[in-house]
Image (spheres, grey):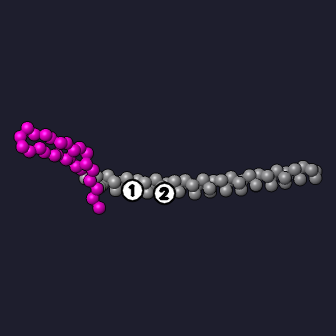
Amino acid sequence: MTVVAASDTMWIPSQVQRSSLMTITRNITEHKRAEVELMKHREHLEELVKERTNELRMANEQLQEEMTARKRAERAVQGSS
């Protein structure tokens, strides 16, 4: 699909019988394709960040549980001596 943007349209009145209409257009197909590609990459990166954040949250929870268990074990050893 080709995407064309009209950037300027001018009505040029003439003093003679005819008037003219001039339009300047440019092909923005590649620009639009690049925008779509960037959006896909951005969405993919956001998904990777969510996954990594979840992994880190789970690892942090596990470490907190291990620290709590270790403190309990230390108290139990200190209490029995």
Q: Which residue is mark 1?
A: 37
- Which amino acid lies under the numbered mark 1 shown in the image of this protein? Glu
Q: Within 10 angstroms of label 1, few (less than 14), some, or many (20 or more) residues?
A: few
Gap in angstroms between the C-alphas marked 2 and 1: 11 Å
The mark nearer the N terminus, 2 or 1, is: 1
Q: Return the x and y of residue 43 as percentages of the image width and height.
A: 48, 55
Q: Is residue 75 above or below residue 16?
A: below
The label number, if any, that marks residue 16 in the structure image: none
Magenta segment range?
1-26
| Magenta stretch, main secondary structure class | strand
Q: Nearer the viewer, residue 46 or 32?
A: 32
Query: Most extreme residue toward the top, as rendered?
Result: 15
Q: Nearer the viewer, residue 17 or 1?
A: 17
Report the side of 80 relative to 49 (left or right).
right
Is residue 7 in the magenta section?
Answer: yes
Query: Most extreme residue toward the front, as rendered?
Result: 17
Q: Residue at x 93, y 53 (%)?
A: 80
Specify the quadrant that holds the N terminus: bottom left
Q: Return the x and y of residue 34 as percentages of the image width and height.
A: 35, 54
- Which amino acid lies under the numbered mark 2 shown in the image of this protein? His
- Under circle 2, the secondary element is helix
Q: Residue at x 10, y 40 (%)?
A: 14
Q: Return the x and y of residue 78 as percentages of the image width and height.
A: 90, 49
Q: Nearer the viewer, residue 55 or 6?
A: 6
Q: Within 10 angstroms of label 2, few (less than 14), some, or many (20 or more) residues?
A: few
Q: Residue at x 76, y 55 (%)?
A: 65
- Under circle 1, the secondary element is helix
Q: Which residue is mark 2?
A: 44
